[in-house]
Image: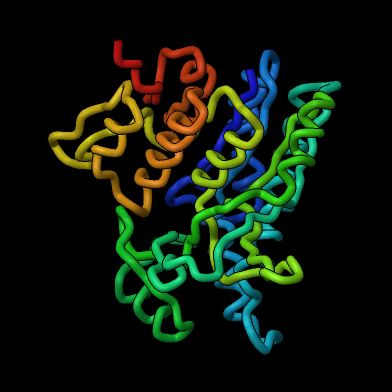
Amino acid sequence: MRIVIALGGNALLRRGEHPDAAVQVANIDRVVGAIAALAHDHEIVVTHGNGPQIGLLAGESAADPALSAPYPLDLLGAQTQGMIGSLLVRGLHDALPGRRTVALVTHTLVRADDPAFEHPTKFIGQVYPYDIASALARKRGWRIAADTTGWRRVVPSPAPEGVLETETVHELLAGGSIVVCAGGGGVPVTADLDTGALTGVEAVVDKDLTAALLAEDLKADFLLILTDVPCVYTDYGTAGQRPVLGATPAELRGGDFPEGSMGPKAEAAARFVERTGGLAAIGALDAAYEIVHGTSGTLVRPELPVV
């Protein structure tokens, strides 16, 4: 089976952890263990979030007196692909001796007129109390929004139109490699209508929506979205929250999930299942093997045919 795995941005930096390199290196064993358990029997493509990492780099860049202007988000996204990709490749190299693993910096095409540029929703960076977040927003020109435990920077998140290196990923899979790609949703670029020339844009593409599109184009059988909760919940965080263990795309879309957290994951799973007839699932990183084998997580399945 060909599985595209979308790792949450908190896979290497969990909420509340200090963003040191040593913390991320220490967390890599847990991530690699989840992937390796599936890689023995399946073709694997790994995508990953980069919210904590790109937020850290953006903050450092904005505060660096040696720079006349902060580095743009497209270049910072490329940096996070290299860093996280390297950690994953090294870990998988040790966990799966003899199995080839490659990390590929990939670019995701977006539309220059996407309305998301006017309505930023993608959380990046750490969580702040409101007074600190608002002070940073005034100083650095950020937009901020309330997250579950505080306030964070939000940036535009245009819809992915295609991963430019999809054919390369396909060839690497055909050669038996595990492929790490489309990190942070891929480096967002627009293409000139006349020349096709690429231009980076100030945005972070949602990694789950990119993973769904990539999985569709690679003709994957299964889209596995891993996060920090065991499954999808309705009314999450309230006394009335209930687990959703199985759903069709229509049922999942009816859940009214928050746009900045579970919403894109639910939409990504629904799109993949609708467009391919394959299966998708959402659940906890540590239960990746169990999710694929149907004993954990939320399984998203096609609509049953009307007879």
Depth check: give the residue in front, 45 or 101: 45
| Residue depicted at 44% across the width and 27% down the height | 281
**Residue located farthest toward the front when viewing the structure as drawn:** 307
| Residue depicted at 55% across the width and 70% down the height | 112
**Residue located farthest toward the bottom when viewing the structure as drawn:** 68
Of the 4 image quadrants, the one containing the N terminus is top right
Expressed as whole percent of the image width and height from the top left, the position of residue 103 reads: 76, 43
Q: Is residue 142 left or right of residue 183?
A: left
Q: Is residue 244 left or right of residue 120?
A: left
| Residue depicted at 75% across the width and 38% down the height | 169
The answer to whether one can see residue 301 in this image is: yes
Expressed as whole percent of the image width and height from the top left, the position of residue 130 reads: 30, 71
Of the 4 image quadrants, the one containing the C terminus is top left
Q: Is residue 171 left or right of residue 152?
A: right
**Placement of 244 over or under 123, stated as above or below:** above
Query: What's the colour scheme?
Result: rainbow
Could you say which quadrant of the image residue 298 lies in?
A: top left
